[in-house]
Amino acid sequence: MLNVNVLYRRKSSLWGVLLCVGIVIYRLSVLYLGHMNLHFDEAQYWLWSHHLDWGYFSKPPMIAWAIYGQRFFFGDSEFALKVLSLCVYIISSCMIYLICRIRYDRAISLGAALLFFTMPAVSLSSFIISTDVFLILFWILALWQVVKALEFDDRHWLWAGFFAGCGLLTKYTMVLFLPSLFLFAGLGGRLNAFLKNRCVLLAMLIAFCMLLPNLLWNASHDMVSFGHLYEISQVEKKRLHFSELFAFLGAQFGVFGLFSSVLLIRYCLWDYNRALQDRYGRLWLSLFVVFLGVICMQAFLSRAFANWAAPSYVAASIWLSVVLCQRHKSHLLALAIAVNLVTMGLMYHYEMIYQVLGVELTKKTDPMRMIRHWDTLGREVSLVSQSYPDHIILTENRKILGELIYYVKPRPFNAQIFNPSHAVKNYFQHTQDLNQYKDRQFLWVSREQSTVALKPYFNVIEKVDTILIPSYQQEVTPYYVYRLSEFSGY
């Protein structure tokens, strides 16, 4: 006869699985019914997928490769592109469950997977094509192999090196996985053995060899990716701002979840000595502290965005679930997941909540303002361009350019950016040179009404149209369209 506790655990596991399935269905419905436009960064990544390479201006190539595969099977619609992120997070959550099952029971494993899958950052980025989505996946896969290497066979280190290499081809911060392992080995008094392990050294070599083509690509392109990384981190601005650090740390409560973060501080970080006594406690601590610590230092010295520390919450989810379940406080874990679910609902339906509360939707109160109305602009520009089929679309703004290439029909893959200063601040400036089109005519699309900046380069400037895009309430956003010809070159 089955034990009552066994039946209870099986029933809880069943409800946990049903909850996961329900979240997936819910997110799919929100994504499908929401008709979300692409963010300009997403549009740029989509464009990269049409020109596969070993590197791009601001990122390694993995995101372009992934979108290429998605497009090949499912097409180019916003839903088809964005659902890729949700699918990756489903895989990541399942892998967290499998990692935990190597060492822990179902309750801990399911709790960790649910805590990760419901954290606010995941709820939000499930609808966003970003490098963080794939970085977290490869971080988890590398961790999976590390745990298997610790439990079973050193040969799993080789697979850990492979997945780490995939992570490096996704985002360079994957390199922090290695110092995390150094700290883990050091806390256990096994750093020398770790560094002498042939499989570990071979894993490092595998990861480096996988990154090498991207390094060679950068070497042949003026190290442009690393230059961009240096620029956005603003490390040249020598400032020690506690306000930046506190703002970043405050934002982490929104990344992991308010109640989850409080529990993490109270039961994990506050009592870190308990983790030091356990092999896997040291692993979760190391993976969390190193990544978050480095990004905190970045925030203190210059600046850091909240999502930059996202991979640290893989270990945090596991660590918190283990501690709460082992200390018989699984009700707190369930409450943290419930709070995350409520937060998810508030995030997805904020417009409805605004209406109930009488809050006016404006640029300041709308978190989705950056992805609104690009499809409308694309349709209007498409109508105008039909009268000028041989004209090349031209703009000075990389955000507008990326969105127009995606939303104008037929897609103007030859659209260009206006760059008389020869600055190299984005992908288009890095890859395009308007001087090769001296004999062509252009359709200028811009938020700027003045054409003073164009006059030294074009002998003919004729206004074609003013496109008014509905914004908030009675507001409209104007875009000005001009026909340009007789380009004299920069």
Image (tube, helix red, strand yellow):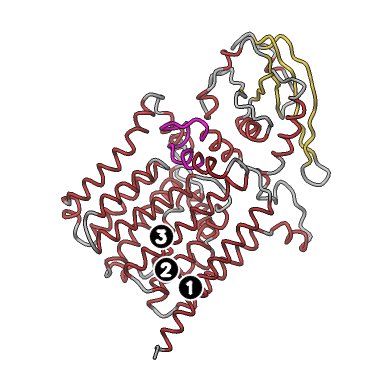
Please tell me the numbered disc located at residue 320.
2
Q: Amino acid at mark 1?
A: Leu
Rendered view: 345 above or below 295: below
Name the residue that disc number 1 marks: 333
| Sequence-wise first label, 1 or 3 | 3
Q: Is residue 267 magenta?
A: no
Q: What are the residue bounds of the magenta stretch?
A: 49-67
How far apart marks 1 and 2 lie (CA) works out to 8 Å
Residue 27 in percent (x, y) is at 60, 59
- Left or right: residue 420 compared with residue 441: left
Residue at 55% x, 27% y is: 428
193 is higher (above) or lower (below) than 464: below
* Amino acid type at mark 3: Met
What is the three-letter code of the residue carrying label 2? Leu
- Looking at the image, tell me whether mark 2 or mark 3 is earlier in sequence order: 3
- Pointer 3: what residue? 95
- Name the one closer to the observer, 418 or 258: 418
Q: Please tell me whether residue 58 belongs to the stretch shown in magenta.
A: yes
